[in-house]
Amino acid sequence: MNKSADSVIIMAAGDGSRLKSSIPKVFNKIGGLSLLGHVINSAKKINPREIIAVLKPSHKDFWLELDDDVKIACQGTPLGTGDAVRCGLNAAAADDLGWVYILYGDIPLVSSETLLKLSETEKCPRTGVIVLALNSEDSSELGRLELGDEPGTLKSIIERKDASSKCHEMTRLYNAGLLVKKTLLRQFMNEMQPSSVTGEFYITGIVRMAHEAGYLCRYHQGNAEELAGANTLAELALLEGYFQKKMREKCLSNGARLIAPETVFFSHDTIVEKDVLIHQYVIFLENVRLKSGAEIGPFCVVEGSEVGSAKIGPFTRLRPGNEIGDGAKVGNFVEIKNSVIAENVKINHLSYVGDSEIGKNSNVGAGTITCNYDGINKHKTFVGENVFIGSNTALVAPVKVCANATVGAGSVITEDVEDGALAIARGTQRNIKNWPRNSRNSKDKK
C-alpha cells in the first residue's frame, strides 16, 4: 500500500504531574504498551507518510521505546499545544501536501478506524479543519466546541481556562484531536497569538481563525471510551479496563472461547486464533501467540511464548522464549523458560524447565528441574524423543539425554545419557534392621 500525503503530529511532551508517577505521562502503560505507543500504532495503520512525536528533552531516556521510523521533535519550553504543533510542523516534510492529523499522546485508545472516518468526513474545497469530537458530561481538561450555524460545523474551540459559564452551557462536545489542511496549518501557525489569560498558544485557536477566514470547520463524533484520556491514576485504571474490554471482544468475535472474559487480561500484542479455550484468571503478558486448539487453564501467566494445540495449566507460568508443540501437556505449578517443548510432551506437575529442548513424546516426571545456571552462565539441556524422566530428577546442564532413554527417579544427571540407556544417579540406599525408634524417642524425652 502506498503511503498517503498526510502527516501525523502527536503531542506528547507533558509531565503528567497529576499521575503522581516518576514516568512521563505518555510512557505509562496499558496492556503492556505506553500510551504514546498505542497512538503511534493506530497512526501507522492509516499509512501516513510520516509520524512525528513532540517530546520533552528531559524525557530522552524514554525515547528509545519508540520505533526508528517515528520522527522526534523537541519542545524545550512548554508554551502550549500550539507551540507543540509548531515544533512538530518544523520537523515535517517541507511541502504543503495533504492534511495533518494532530493527536494527543494521552488519548491512547483512538483507533485507526476512527482516524479514517475523520478523513472521510464530508469535505468540500472550503473545508479546512475537521475536529474529532468527544461527547461527555465532564471532560474539563479538553477544549469545548462552539457549534456553527450550519449543521456539523464549528465556529471555535474554547479552552477550559478561557471558557465562560455560558460556553459550558452550549455543548457537551469536546476536542479530542484535529485534522487540518497542511497549507492552512502553516499559514495560521504564523498568525497565531497567545491566550490573553494564560499566555499559551492553543492549537485549537486554528478553528476560530479558519472560520473567520471563510473556511468550513467540521467535526466527527467518536466513541467516548475510545477517546478517554488519562490525567490521574484512576483514569489510567479506567483506560486499562476499556482496553481489556476491547481485547476480550476481539478474541470472542474471532472465534476464541473465554469461560469468564472479565477475569482474563491481555497484552496489546496478544494473538489468539479461533478455537482457543481460555479459562478463568489468566494473564497474558507481551509477545504471546495462541494457535488454534490451544487450551489455557485457570490461573496461568503466559509471556513471550507460542503455544500450539496444547493444554496448559492450571497454575502454569510460561516465561519468555518458549515454543509449545501440538498435543503437549504442561500442568500444575510448572515453570518453563526459553525452551522448545515438542509435540505430545508431558510435563504435568511441579517442574522447572529452562533453556531446554524436549523431544517428541517424552515424559518429564513431577519435581524434575533443569539446572541451567551455574552462577555465571546459562547452559542448555537436550532431551531426545520418547524419553522418560523419573520424578524428582535434576538435569545439570549442559547435558544431553538421547532418544528412548530412561532416567530413574531421584537422579542427579551430570553426564550425557546415550540412546535407549537407563541412567540412575543417586546415593545407594542403606536399610538398617531393627532400628530402635521407640527407645530413641524415649531417650530424647529424658
Image (cartoon, rainbow, N blue to C red):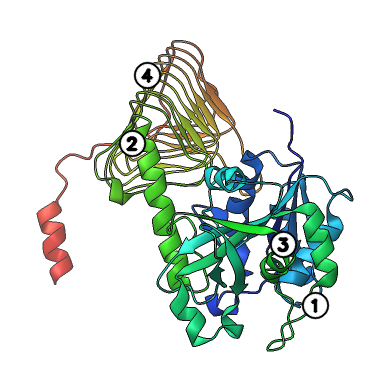
Mark 3 crowdedness (10 Å alpha carbons): few <14, some 14-19, many ≥20 = few
Pick whichever, 354 or 199, lies toward us.
199
Pick whichever, 102 or 151, lies toward us.
151
Front of the two marks 2 and 4:
2
Front of the two marks 4 and 1:
1
Q: Is label 3 in a helix, a strand or a loop?
A: loop
Q: Which residue is mark 2?
A: 252
Q: Which residue is mark 1?
A: 77
Q: Is residue 264 left or right of residue 40?
A: left
Q: Is residue 171 left or right of residue 180?
A: left
In the picture shown, does residue 187 fall above or below 48? below
Q: Which residue is mark 3?
A: 214
Q: Position of residue 372 (x, y in %)?
A: 55, 39
Measure the C-alpha gap from mark 4 to mark 1: 61 Å
Q: Earlier in the sequence, mark 3 or mark 1?
A: 1
Q: Which residue is mark 4?
A: 344
Q: Amino acid at mark 4?
A: Asn
Q: Earlier in the sequence, mark 1 or mark 2?
A: 1
Measure the C-alpha gap from mark 1 to mark 2: 46 Å
Q: Quadrant of residue 238?
A: bottom left
Measure the C-alpha gap from mark 2 to mark 4: 27 Å
Q: Are marks 3 and 1 in contact (CB under 8 Å)?
A: no
Mark 2 crowdedness (10 Å alpha carbons): few <14, some 14-19, many ≥20 = some
In the picture shown, does residue 312 fall above or below 218? above
Q: Amino acid at mark 3?
A: Gly
Q: Quadrant of the C terminus?
A: bottom left
Q: Position of residue 86 (x, y in %)?
A: 80, 65
Q: Is label 2 in a helix, a strand or a loop?
A: helix
